[in-house]
Amino acid sequence: MQGYRHILLTTDFTDTGKKCVQKASAMAQQYGAKLTIVHVVEPLPAYAMSYMGSVNLEEEMLTQAQLSLEQQVKEFSLTDVEQRVELGSIKACILKIAKDENADLIIVGSHGRHGLERLIGSTASAVLQGAECDVLVVHTYD
């Protein structure tokens, strides 16, 4: 079996996300794979935006996410890693990036609590069902 060439890591900046960063970094080193880390900011509903006036809260959220991603990359001393912050549906963005970038492995964390999501998490479940490549779900809750 040939190793992975491009690993797409999803992160949410939680302890779950940190465990995933450790796993993805080790796997990227093991396989000599490219590593892309993505954080997706979900858009605010239109009615919420109307209450914000001239404040562009989504822009602030994207800026903060980029700063958090840079901090996470620095915290784990990652080099040669592509960083992406996207605005949109988490599932749709992850699957689109994986397809566009020809990722052959997506790594997601799990901390869900209901039904199938209880076993692997709602985001992990959605990605797992829609992915055209391997998906590694990192179990991170007790």
Image: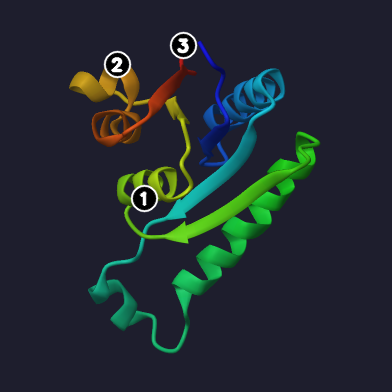
141, 81: nearer the viewer: 81
Q: What is the number of callouts on the image?
A: 3
Alpha-carbon distance for marks 1 and 2? 24 Å
Q: Earlier in the sequence, mark 1 or mark 2?
A: 1
Q: Residues within 10 Å of mark 2 (few under 14, many from 20)?
A: some
Say which residue label 2 marks: 119
- Looking at the rendering, which quadrant does residue 136 occupy? top left
Q: Say above or below: 75 vs 68.
A: above
Secondary element type, mark 3:
loop
Say which residue label 1 marks: 96
| Relative image position of residue 66 (x, y in whole percent) | 62, 58
48, 9: nearer the viewer: 9
Q: Relative to residue 51, is residue 65 drawn left or right?
A: right
- Looking at the rendering, which quadrant does residue 14 occupy? top right
Residue type for callout 3: Asp
| Relative image position of residue 22 (x, y in whole percent) | 66, 24
Alpha-carbon distance for marks 2 and 3? 12 Å
Say which residue label 3 marks: 142
Residue type for callout 2: Leu
- The residue located at (61%, 21%) in the rendering is 23
Q: Earlier in the sequence, mark 3 or mark 1?
A: 1
Of tags 3 and 1, the one toward the viewer is 1
Which residue appears farthest toward the left when viewing the image?
Answer: 115
- Looking at the rendering, which quadrant does residue 30 occupy? top right
Secondary element type, mark 2:
helix
Q: Are marks 3 and 1 in contact (CB under 8 Å)?
A: no
- The residue located at (33%, 36%) in the rendering is 123
- The residue located at (67%, 58%) in the rendering is 67
| Relative image position of residue 74 (x, y in whole percent) | 78, 43
Q: Say above or below: 43 vs 82.
A: below
